[in-house]
Amino acid sequence: MPNWLSLTATEIQALQLSVSIALRSVVFNLPIGIGIAWLLTRRRFPGRLFFDAIVHLPLVLPPVVIGYVLLMLLGIRSPIGAWLFDHFNIRLVFTSTGAAVATAVMSLPLMVRSIRIALEGVDRGLEQAARTLGASAMNCFCTVTLPLMLPGVLAGIVTAFSAGLGEFGAVITFVGNVPGETQTLPLALYSALQSPSGSSTAAHLATLSCLLGLTGLVLAEVLARSLRRHFGHTV
Amino acid sequence: MLTVELTKQQGDFSLSVQFKMTDSGVMALFGRSGCGKSTIVNLLAGLVSADSGYIKLDDNVLLDTTRRINQPPEHRRIGYVFQDARLFPHYNVEGNLRYGLQRNKQHSVRFQFDTVVQLLGLTPLLLRHTQHLSGGEKQRVALGRALLSQPRLLLLDEPLASLDGVHREELLPYLAEIRDELNIPMIYVSHQFDELLHLATEVLLLQHGQVITQGDLPAISRRPELRSLIGNDALGVVIEGQVQTIDHPSGLAQLAIGDAILNVNIGTLQTGQRLRVQLLARDLILATSMPHGLSVRNIIRGSIVSLTPDEPYAVLVNIDIGGATLVARITTVAASELHLRSGLPIWVLVKTVTLRGHVYPSINRLQQQLT
């Protein structure tokens, strides 16, 4: 029983890596997610439905396909990947940054959905009131719209983060399974299952993943509720 | 001075209006719902864009479609009180009040925080959350918030419509107070004629997106178009007069209306105050000779100017009482039995209790404050 609580160095490394990659993917996703949600909710432009579908594609595609597409787009021999490497010395393949990018693409639809629902719940009348009181469009967004959609944004962050901890297919396809660099919890679990002596490690990692996922989902709900109470209206 | 010319097409509805407004007082936009009142204030505030038009406030062109000028709402310095308060739920009352103030500090602060808070009785509410306020309190906060954004013009879109009777009565005096003390021109959207009696210094009568007429309330109250808007029961001439004497033992105040004297309930009236009363056409009783032994306190002598048949069984009788014209609505049978005809001397009977006076500052006083 005691060794249920003690984690090996490899397991701790996988956990840390998972958390770090998921965090980075959320930081990367947040402004993009708000931007896309705003475009989809507030703007009417040609091709909006198509754009909406593209954003949500990772929800329905096999993650391996996303990993493959990323490899084609951002791999070191692709034009964008080569440009990133030549000009900024950024290499994505086989790095944790690449893992964060793959995770971000996979969790973007979750983030966008959550923010979008929150944005749709914001009373446009309050924004109009803010404008007549002297707030510019940007100032109004920052002081009225954003605070009012905060519960949804926070829920989106927590959901995307929780999902990001466990991203498997896209990560392993795009950046491989490099211990200490791209070997997150699920990848370490996969490796453990491949080795004959790894069954205890696999059980450890699986339990850990479940706990993290549960904590994330409960936290998201608690946050949303407390904020709703604070604002006392429909968000 | 506000100069407005606007056109706007919205589906089947087309709006085309032109009007001017002076620097003080309350201009009421009056008409049925769907006549374009709210669209006009939204266009003025810049929340809706006009198809074509021109808006000039003081020396500032806010909209000129021919020159492609269209200032955004935040640059117009026009305050807006919405029907549904629209307080920010994530700020408390003080936060709401300061929102506009903070964003307009570069302009000279005409309306100080403390003054506005005191005028609207908001001190006990400052730290409250907006969702715990009553409807009337919400509107008072919205009013204060709009004033503190240092506007040059205040728009009020049916601010009383979402309130029940008691809260309406509670808010009206505050609006009158703002009109009389703060000297800011206001445009007041309403479809309740009694609100106009309280507040309006000028009326813009609207129908189907067009201005029917513009004028002061006594003049508007005699317009035939008004009747289809307010109905027969609310029809009645509005007259303005000055309180001459106050007779405490009888509880009556005497109001000079043209050559006639009208007794009204004393209330909180003071000598010299200007008062506005509406004499409802259905409340007036006519007599062809001076009546005796009646409880009625107001017996005014006049002469019939004209008779207008009104619906199958009623007649509208216009009566000159010397400097003012009254309208009475009586049955056709009564009119023929009394042989009413123009030029006939007549006595008009009005019960004191049916008269409600609305204290009202003269335009002169409002203009004096400006200088």
Image: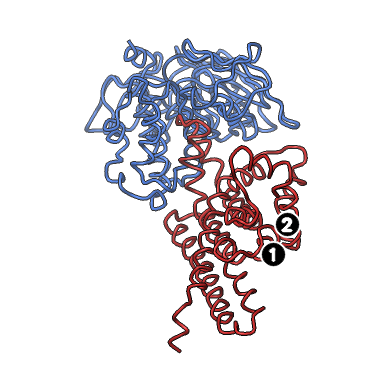
Chain colours: A red, B blue
Report helix, strand or loop for mark 2.
Answer: helix
Please state which of residues B280 and A217 is positioned toward the viewer in this rendering: A217
Tell me which label, 1 or 2, sits earlier in the chain: 2
Please give the chain letter of the residue carrying mark 1. A
Which label number is shown at residue B201? none
Reply above or below: B172 against B226.
below
Marks 1/2: CA–CA distance: 8 Å
Asked whether the viewer can see residue A192, the reply is yes
Please state which of residues A222 and B21 is positioned toward the viewer in this rendering: A222
Residue kind at label 1, given as amino acid type:
Gly
Residue indicated by mark 2: A66
Asked whether the viewer can see residue B357, the reply is no
Please state which of residues B295 and A11 is positioned toward the viewer in this rendering: A11
Which label number is shown at residue A169? 1
Q: Position of residue B33 (x, y in %)?
A: 62, 35
Residue kind at label 2, given as amino acid type:
Ile
Residue at 51%, 25% in the rendered image: B28
Q: Position of residue B2 (x, y in %)?
A: 50, 15
Please state which of residues B216 and B14 is positioned toward the viewer in this rendering: B14
Question: In which quadrant of the rendered view does residue B36 lie?
Answer: top right
Reply above or below: A150 against A165.
above
Please give the chain letter of the residue carrying mark 2. A
Question: In which quadrant of the rendered view does residue A81 lie?
Answer: top right
Contact, CB < 8 Å: mark 1 with mark 2? Answer: yes
Same chain, labels 1 and 2: yes
Q: Position of residue B239 (x, y in %)?
A: 44, 21
Residue at 49%, 54% in the rendered image: A233
Reply above or below: B155 against A163.
above
Q: Quadrant of the C terminus of chain B?
A: top left
Report helix, strand or loop for mark 1.
Answer: helix
